[in-house]
Amino acid sequence: MQLHTGRFHTLKQTSLGPGCRTGACPTESNMRSNMWPAVLAAVCVVGACALSHVEEMKSQERLFRSSLGLSGRPRPAGGHQPRRRVPSQLWKMFRGSENIKARESDPCTVSEYGVPGNIIRYVQDQGRLVSGWSSSCQACLEKQLFFNMSVLQPVELLSLAQLEVNFHWNLFTSAELLRGPRALSVSLYKVIRATLRETNPQASRRLLLSQSVRLQPEPSSVTMDLTSLAESWRKPGRNYGLVLELLPLSAGPEELLPFRPGNSLPLEPAFTLPLIQASLVAVSLDPQQCRSRQRRSAVHLPVTPSNVCKARRLYIDFKDVGWQDWIIAPQGYMANYCHGECPFPLSESLNGTNHAILQTLVHSLDPHGTPQPCCVPIRLSPISMLYYDNNDNVVLRHYQDMVVDECGCR
């Protein structure tokens, strides 16, 4: 009989018995066909485990997003519309939250605005521009403003809603500035009801603000506290938005620059229309995330190996879990974790409770019947996160229980 060196052929040779000569032994093709059910079963088990792991990851991500008030994953960058730029004030507040004074400050107060809160949103304007025409003022520029306040969770308490309107002029020379208007008259109205066609829109508006803004090369801004109005917008069917009217003024307030009546601008306007950027700074307080801020500044984890319960280093990179598309900053952070044994007798350094001390004692007497206490976090601290929500608003949130500072036996 010819010898074979392959593993499969060797198996075939050693499995030959007396019955093989009579044709009772399974052929090679039969052996292969008999192996497929087992192989398919193994593949199915592995596939089911992989599917279960993916579903578990999605479930954990949904749980974390829900705690941030996100109904779904925010759209990734690079879509049809570019991402909104992060306001410089939010960057400043985010960086300031990491300094020593911020770590010792009240976690439920936004010191920059002097109001209670641990969530700061820049809610972007979703209104439209009616260029060069206003139904109540033929020489005015009318801009509708709308801010979606449903982005706040019901549990959140609104502390501040501040309107910020920035005007950017495209002026190239100082001579052009001198030839044009000197200022803009700015009027802000709240809309109290829906306006029907062929009705006077003024009947459904109430004046909130009227002031002039000087025309200058640098951007100008108008701010106004709209907290009580924004609170009413949180009720269904109560948000009809705002209307902003701009009236160009020349050297004297009585001299109006001509705009052609209708929906279009003059063929040769006397000045360049400003770029209007409006946002609503909403500061709110989530009481569930409002506890004493014990920052991680004084935490120095040991690097010496040990099997005793203690905090271990763990860095979480948001890119590794696929969240870099909507989390702006930080890109990752030192989260740490607890691991190790709780041996008998428990020392003070293991931060054991009275129950854990007694459980360790009983475990030493009956190791099979009573388990050791568990090594768990006993002190955690928050981090500040800057991210996009489902409406592409930029949000700064102080998020509790993100960093393990200390472990103990429980």
Image (cartoon, rainbow, N blue to C red):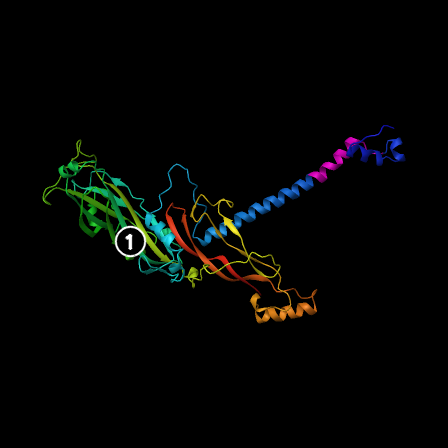
Q: x%, y% of residue 276?
A: 26, 42
Pick the front one: 98 or 220: 98
**Is residue 259 in sight in this rendering?**
no
Q: Is residue 168 above or below residue 162?
A: above
Find numbered disc 1 in the image and state the secondary structure of the residue it sits on: strand
Residue at 28% over, 57% down? 228
Residue 233 within the segment the image draws in magenta: no
Q: Quadrant of the C terminus?
A: bottom right
Tell me what residue is drawn at x 36 percent, y 46 percent: 86
Magenta residues, dominant SS class: helix
- Residue 139 occupies which quadrant of the picture? top left
Residue located 41% across and 60% down the image: 103
Q: From the image, which quarter does the N terminus lie in?
A: top right
Residue that extends furthest to the front in the rendered view of this protein:
304
Give the residues in magenta: 25-39
Read off the residue under disc 1.
162
